[in-house]
Image (cartoon, helix red, strand yellow):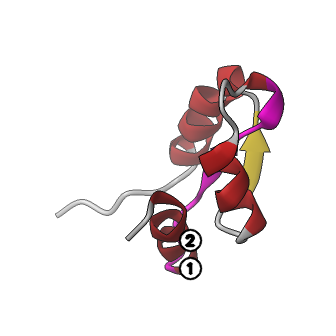
């Protein structure tokens, strides 16, 4: 499975997906392919991705045994 298809699989199964924007990429090939196939929910600059991940999981409730 290629990386963009794998990311699309994750999104299709309810996971949050983020791609890097063109302006902050050295090579925009894989992020572009992922965005074009609808695999990413958010397209962000590199410096914002870690914060978006933290924000996503800070609001997620995790069930414990």
The residue located at (57%, 28%) in the rendering is 50
Q: Nearer the viewer, residue 56 or 59?
A: 56
**Quadrant location of the N terminus?**
bottom left
What kind of element bears circle 1?
helix
- Relative height, residue 23 to residue 55 (above, below): above
**Quadrant location of the C terminus?**
bottom left
Q: Is residue 43 magenta?
A: no
- Relative height, residue 41 to residue 26 (above, below): below
Mark 2 lies on residue:
8
Q: Nearer the viewer, residue 23 or 57?
A: 23
Q: Position of residue 5 (x, y in %)?
A: 51, 70
Q: Position of residue 3 (x, y in %)?
A: 46, 58
In the image, taking residue 29 as reference, residue 24 lies left or right, namely right
Mark 1 lies on residue:
12
Crowding at mark 2 (Cα within 10 Å: few <14, some 14-19, many 20+): many
Residue at the farthest top position: 47
Which residues lie in the magenta part?
13-23
In the image, taking residue 39 as reference, residue 4 lies left or right, namely left
Q: Is residue 14 magenta?
A: yes
What kind of element bears circle 2?
helix
The residue located at (77%, 37%) in the rendering is 21
- Label 1 and label 2: CA atoms lie apart by 6 Å
């Amino acid at each position: 499975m290629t990386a963009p298809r794998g990311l699309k699989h994750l999104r299709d199964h309810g996971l949050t997906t983020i791609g890097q924007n063109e302006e902050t990429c050295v090579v925009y090939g894989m992020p572009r392919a992922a965005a074009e196939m609808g695999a990413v929910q958010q397209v962000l600059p590199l410096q914002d991705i870690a914060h978006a991940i933290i924000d996503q999981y800070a609001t997620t409730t995790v069930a414990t045994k």
